[in-house]
Amino acid sequence: MGNLKIKASVFINYLLFGIMLNSVGTVILQVQRYYGVTESSASILEAFKDITIAVVSFLVASFITRIGYKKSMQIGLTAVALACFLVPSVKTFIAIKLLFAVTGASFALTKISVFGSIGLITKGEKEHISFMNFLESFFMVGILMGYFIFSYFIDDADAASERWFHIYYFIGGLYLLALLLLSSAPLNESEARPAELLKAEQSFSDMLKLLVLPLVVSFVICAFLYVLIEQSIMSWLPTFNNKVLHLPSSFSVLMAGIMAASTAIGRFLAGIILKKISWHIALTTCLIAAACLVLIALPLAKAESGHQIHVWADVPLSAYIFPLIGFFLAPIYPAVNSVILAALPKEKHGAMSGLIVVFSALGGSLGSLITGYIFQHYGGQSAFYFSLVPLTLLTIALFIFKRTRSAARINKENNAPK
């Protein structure tokens, strides 16, 4: 019963962080409407979220086992709940920035704690893999739920309406309920502590040593570019829908949910397909398809822009087509993560996980900043056409990653005891 309770708690925690972390796109749109800030100024919210994830993830490995996984998750949930209650009380742009910084730091604590806890609450490799898949699915469900929840609190007719701040009372309450569930769930961490304490002392040096390996460098570039693409699109899709396609704000947020749904479906199907065909062929095909979708959807968006939207029947076709890019991008990140982890000894997985979180966060932050700058100075069409550049670079990076992976495998086989 206790095991089920802690598993349920972990799922709910991930779902709630899915809602909060990926609400940044919706909030980017809302702060432009409510505070009248520019696209470039609004894009800084992504950096407040992602840089804190990167920094805390890098630092936390050295002491998180001393605090404890459960206690770290409790700290994260409490911090986000308090920040949520603060925002509608002060209603300032600084408070919004603080909210995303706190959420990013808390997610870093939670993610590392969850990854460390999975081995304690599952039995065997198959259950571990299954649990991880369900966990990522719950995160995507949280993203999708977030679009619906936030759209309900948005007032399309009045940009100065304070109604959207009320969402944070609701979300803060959910975090408090999650905290109560976690506090009542037993988690035996005795198995993890001795081994983890030893690893914690070497975490920084282990990360730096990994960064000199060609295989790891090529992977880091792939992970960085992928998250740059995904976050630059996901975070700015509500603004694109509103300012380019002229959808009402609530419609803009709801339509962005298509990307979350298509990403979830894409990852589910990829789990079946990647068992049967080469990961490199599958991912390269996905990248080409994503680029083609950009070239199809954006000209349609240009032709359809300027139409007034009053009911769902007025929503242009491009608003449905472009978010489907999530379906083709979906398999890339989990696949390259699996490939790099499978290529390294198990004792290196902790340090590698830290690098994954750090460079993913940096990629997401840079992607949003670049997109915000282009959006402000050259328009939404140009901002989303820019995605073709990192898509091309990622295709090249995947080829290099495959080559270095093959070379590393050959070296491993040659150096194996005869």
Image: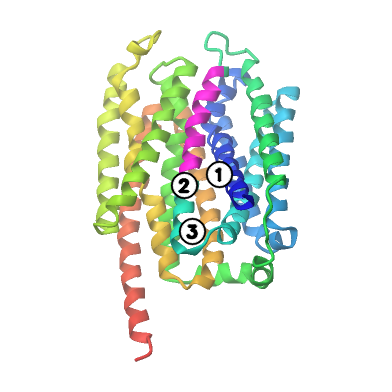
Residue matched to label 3: 128
Q: Quadrant of residue 298?
A: top left
Q: Amino acid at mark 2?
A: Phe
| Residue pictured at 33% horizontal, 57% vertical | 398
| Residue pictured at 34% horizontal, 11% vertical | 314
Q: Quadrant of the C terminus?
A: bottom left
| Residue pictured at 24% horizontal, 57% vertical | 277
Residue 119 locus on image (x, y percent): 56, 61
Q: Examine the rendered structure and indicate whether residue 26 appears above or below residue 272.
A: above
Structural distance between the alpha carbons of marks 1 and 3: 14 Å
Q: Secondary structure at mark 1?
A: helix
Label 1 Cα neighbours within 10 Å, binned few <14 / some 14-19 / many ≥20: some
Tag 1 near tag 3, CB within 8 Å: no
**Residue 386 visible at all:** no
Magenta region, residue range: 136-152
Tag 1 near tag 2, CB within 8 Å: yes
Structural distance between the alpha carbons of marks 1 and 2: 8 Å
Position of 248 with respect to 121 (left or right) is: left
Residue 72 locus on image (x, y percent): 70, 52
Label 2 Cα neighbours within 10 Å, binned few <14 / some 14-19 / many ≥20: few
**Residue 37 visible at all:** yes
Q: Amino acid at mark 3?
A: His
Main secondary structure type of the part rendered in magenta? helix
Residue matched to label 2: 134
Q: Secondary structure at mark 3?
A: helix
Disc with the residue nearer the chain's start (1 vs 3)? 1
- Furthest residue to the front? 1
Residue matched to label 1: 11
Disc with the residue nearer the chain's start (3 vs 2)? 3
Q: Quadrant of residue 66?
A: bottom right
Q: Examine the rendered structure and indicate whether residue 294 appears above or below residue 413.
A: above
- In terms of depth relative to the viewer, which is nearer, 155 or 138? 138
